[in-house]
Amino acid sequence: MTNRELQIQANEIRKGIVTAVYHAASGHPGGSLSAADIMTFLYFEELHIDPKNPKDPDRDRFVLSKGHVAPALYSTLAHRGYFPVKDLETLRHVGSYLQGHPDMKHTPGVDMSSGSLGQGLSAAVGMALAGKMDGKDYRVYCMAGDGEIQEGQIWEASMKAAHLKLDNLCLIVDNNGLQIDGNIADVCSPYPIPEKFRAFGFETIEINGHDFDQIRGAFARAKEIKGRPTAIIARTHKGQGVSYMTDQAGWHGKAPNEEQYKQAMEELEKAGEALCSR
């Protein structure tokens, strides 16, 4: 896909995020919107996957360690063809297979149940090690939040990944700078993030997480790295794509009301029209 096609797709995924959270009357739009561009590239360009065969043993794996941004994953999976886009409106409803956090037992395309912050990278390390032991060529990708990396288990998993030389593992840190309690630098600063992962034995790449040229280049570089895992530190904006949510910590975990929903969708519609008219 061209960058413009990816931008158009990411805009549709953002519409799905806002729609899902609105109909649920709860959820986490801010971090979902910040991750949308990288999710789009992963599922429409990077990952070796087949929506018609979601359990293919040779597929690439993706672990959403910051599981509360499930709306981003669900919207991406729906637009990729794993299940109907209309089902996004059932997010968090009783009886829906789209729970508040990813559930690998019930949701097509979800490779790991997640939500307890800090644990996803450990699961990804296990998947990557299994691939090595089985002689498989698949790659494992894991997305963590920058607030999430305050968790000690992230660093235990990082130490193990480097010790095992898991060059089939790629961690993406969604560095939008905000968590539920405010600026990550004020709550419990994880900075400098690239230097920390480098010290733990990772190849580190810093990018603008909304620039598809940089996203493309980072994933291409990650596949070239041998003998160690890669960490892509993606600088993003929380709430990207919706004006009143952008860089606002208050939109970490709340749903828009009807008026706010209409404004968000109007903004995204206009953004989509502008992209299509180029």
Image (spheres, helix red, strand yellow):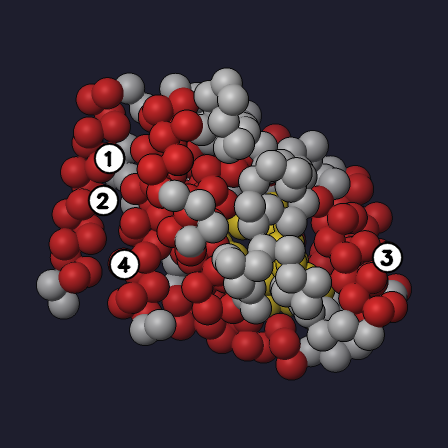
Q: Amino acid at mark 1?
A: Ala
- In space, the residues marked 3 and 2 are separated at their CA atoms by 42 Å
Q: Position of residue 35 (x, y in %)?
A: 46, 49
Q: Nearer the viewer, mark 4 or mark 1?
A: 4
Badge 2, how many Cα within 10 Å: few under 14, some, many 20+? many
- In space, the residues marked 1 and 2 are separated at their CA atoms by 6 Å
Q: Nearer the viewer, mark 3 or mark 4?
A: 4
Badge 4, how many Cα within 10 Å: few under 14, some, many 20+? some
Q: Which residue is mark 3?
A: 160
252 relative position to 166: left or right: left
Q: Which mark is residue 264?
A: 1
Whether 24 is drawn above or below 67: the answer is above
Q: Which residue is mark 4?
A: 8
Numbered disc 2: secondary structure: helix
- In space, the residues marked 1 and 3 are separated at their CA atoms by 42 Å
- In space, the residues marked 2 and 4 are separated at their CA atoms by 10 Å
Residue at x-position 67% and y-position 45%: 112
50 relative position to 276: left or right: right
Numbered disc 4: secondary structure: helix
Residue at x-position 18% and y-position 45%: 269
Badge 1, how many Cα within 10 Å: few under 14, some, many 20+? many
